[in-house]
């Protein structure tokens, strides 16, 4: 009974945005709700499902003809596990151990198993969705390619369910590991981010290794028959083809792992929650605190809010990490690759690379969404900011500056690396430096505008405004589309304009758009903020 109540509570919180408009404080219309759900389905199954369908179409036929159907499901199953774990690991840690209502629930006579169970259902709706998007489209391709039978359909669906449940188990165990590590260290947020980045690095390592494997399989499927000698690999794949023996063993093993995971989570839940809530003892040292300006004090608050939340850093500022990595890669490999390209490429190669360097840097910067959820993250504590004797524009400007600072410095590093590799002329050098920074200002302004218009102050899990809000979605894809569109437009009209002239016009356009949004934020945006 209590478990059902908690599950309904979790579902209402997780998907409240589909059915309820917090800004207007009323239920959405049926048309609006349908539109929200349709957009999610189209994005998930249309984009990611389309990629997995293309993968299935490219390898299913050759493997089926070679009698290696099981290898097809080994590949599909591993991709489903990887996507499920990466997509749900951070959510597992946040949902299980960092929900704002943990203390309130623990103060009630509710068994910890019911609390854990409802949270696991919430995590499963995330990990399971990623896994099913990866597994179901290739499964349909397999049925179409080899023919529909009851055995294949039922077995394949049970295989997909088992993959989703295994991804849930791995995600919860990874969340448990991160939670245990965070309780033993002083700076828990930074360590959590580092552990998560290591996990993501391993994911991309295996992903690229997988790409190489797929290329070899399409060239010679029979070359991988030695995989049959690895214990458990072939039965894992045979489960997807509908072979009942391996499938039943897989389902039984999955059930045992779920029971073990529940036992470990319930046993450690109280201790981790209480350890997380402990206050670290700090030896007081007297020091003089200098006077700060209003802008600097508010910016410091935004930076502390960012560094105190692993979920915020990982989901809203990961583009900064990519910018640094991309800059290092360009600095190391760029000069050699560019020299090789210049030997065979047309004379306008330098102009093309100048535009690409500026646009791609701006595109990567567009993946940061720090400003978009910053207003919603104030939550029910917004009144604290509103009670301060500061202008509303100063508050919004601090959130804007936080985005610009965290994104702009890595983007500047990436731009400098591109300059060292390309060695452009002075105008090209200046534009590679200036254009990405203008893009960052535009993306930060647009994100903050969306954050003000789509503010959600009633969340209980910070992942709702950080990861699941429409403001973040529009900001991220809007920024990526803008950078890609400008790069693509150059290839369309590049013969008519030089790289310097094109980037100059693009910079002017970006500056004008950013200026218009900033003007709206300073006038109408502050009024909307004060009405929240």
Image (cartoon, rainbow, N blue to C red):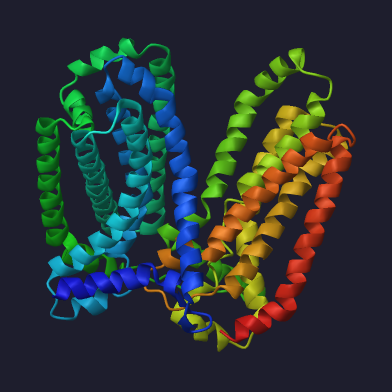
Residue drawn at point x = 61 percent, y = 68 percent: 450
Confirm whether residue 391 shows in the render.
no
Q: Residue at x 31, y 20 (%)?
A: 64
The answer to whether 17 is drawn above or below residue 513 in the figure is below
Residue 369 in picture, x, y percent from top left: 56, 58
Residue placed at 64% from the left, 53% from the top? 479
On-image quarter of the C terminus? bottom right
Image point 44% across, 69% down: which residue? 18
Q: Is residue 308 visible?
A: yes
Q: Nearer the viewer, residue 63 or 177?
A: 63
Where, quadrant-wise, is the N terminus in this rendering? bottom left
Relative to 220, 105 lies left or right:
left
**In this rendering, position of residue 493 left or right of residue 13:** right
Q: Is residue 76 left or right of residue 301?
A: left
Q: Point out residue 460 in the picture as x, y percentages from the top left corner.
A: 37, 73
Q: Find residue 15 and report its image quarter.
A: bottom left
In the image, 348: left or right of 106? Answer: right
User: Which residue is more in the foreground, 351 or 405?
Assistant: 351
User: Can you tell which quarter of the image residue 264 is in?
Assistant: bottom left
Task: Pinpoint residue 283: horizontal percent, then vertical percent.
Answer: 35, 68
- In the rendered picture of this protein, how many numbered marks are placed on residues? 0
Q: Residue 508: horizontal and vertical position, in percent?
A: 84, 53
């Amino acid at each position: 009974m209590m478990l059902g109540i908690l599950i309904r509570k979790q579902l209402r919180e997780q998907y409240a945005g589909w059915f309820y408009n917090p800004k207007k404080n009323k239920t959405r219309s049926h048309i609006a709700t349908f539109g929200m759900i349709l957009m999610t389905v189209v994005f998930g199954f249309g984009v990611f499902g389309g990629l997995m369908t293309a993968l299935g179409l490219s390898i299913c036929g050759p493997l089926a003809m070679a009698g290696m159907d099981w290898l097809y499901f080994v590949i599909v199953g591993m991709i489903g596990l990887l996507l499920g774990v990466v997509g749900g690991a951070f959510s597992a840690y946040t949902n299980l151990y960092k929900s704002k209502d943990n203390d309130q629930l623990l103060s009630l006579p509710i068994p910890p198993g019911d609390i854990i169970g409802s949270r696991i259902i919430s995590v499963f709706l995330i990990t399971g969705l990623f896994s099913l998007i990866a597994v179901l489209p290739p499964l349909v391709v397999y049925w179409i390619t080899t023919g529909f039978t009851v055995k294949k359909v039922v077995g394949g669906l049970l295989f997909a369910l088992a993959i989703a449940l295994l991804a849930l188990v791995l995600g919860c165990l990874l969340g448990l590991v991160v939670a245990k590590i965070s309780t033993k260290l002083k700076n828990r947020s930074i360590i959590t981010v580092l552990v998560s980045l290591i996990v993501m690095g391993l994911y991309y390592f295996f992903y690229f290794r997988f790409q190489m494997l797929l290329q070899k399989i399409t060239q010679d499927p029979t070359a991988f028959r030695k995989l049959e000698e690895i214990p458990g690999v072939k039965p894992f794949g045979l489960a997807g083809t509908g072979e009942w023996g391996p499938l039943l063993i897989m389902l039984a093993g999955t059930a045992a792992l779920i029971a073990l995971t529940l036992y470990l989570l319930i046993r450690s839940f109280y201790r981790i929650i209480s350890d997380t809530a402990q206050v670290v003892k700090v030896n007081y040292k007297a020091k003089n605190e200098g006077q700060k300006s209003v802008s600097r004090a508010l910016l410091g608050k935004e930076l502390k809010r960012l560094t105190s939340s692993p979920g915020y850093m990982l989901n809203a500022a990961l583009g900064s990490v990519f910018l640094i990595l991309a800059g290092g890669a360009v600095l190391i490999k760029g000069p050699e690759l560019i020299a090789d390209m210049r030997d065979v490429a047309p004379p306008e190669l330098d102009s093309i690379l100048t535009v690409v360097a500026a646009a791609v840097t701006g595109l990567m910067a567009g993946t940061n969404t720090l400003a978009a959820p910053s207003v919603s993250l104030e939550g029910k504590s917004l009144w604290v900011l509103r009670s301060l004797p500061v202008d509303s524009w100063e508050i919004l400007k601090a959130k804007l500056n936080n985005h610009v600072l965290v994104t702009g410095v890595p983007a500047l590093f990436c731009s400098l690396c591109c300059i060292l590799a390309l060695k452009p002329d002075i105008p090209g050098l200046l534009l590679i430096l200036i254009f990405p920074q203008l893009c960052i200002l535009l993306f930060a302004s647009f994100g903050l505008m969306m954050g003000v218009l789509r503010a959600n102050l009633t969340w209980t899990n910070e992942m709702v405004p950080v990861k699941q809000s429409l403001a973040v979605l529009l900001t991220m894809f809007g920024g990526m589309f803008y950078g890609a569109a400008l790069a693509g437009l150059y290839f369309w009209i590049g013969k008519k304009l030089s790289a310097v002239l094109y980037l100059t016009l693009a910079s002017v356009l970006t500056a004008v758009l950013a200026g218009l949004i900033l003007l709206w934020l300073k006038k109408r945006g502050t009024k909307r903020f004060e009405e929240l």
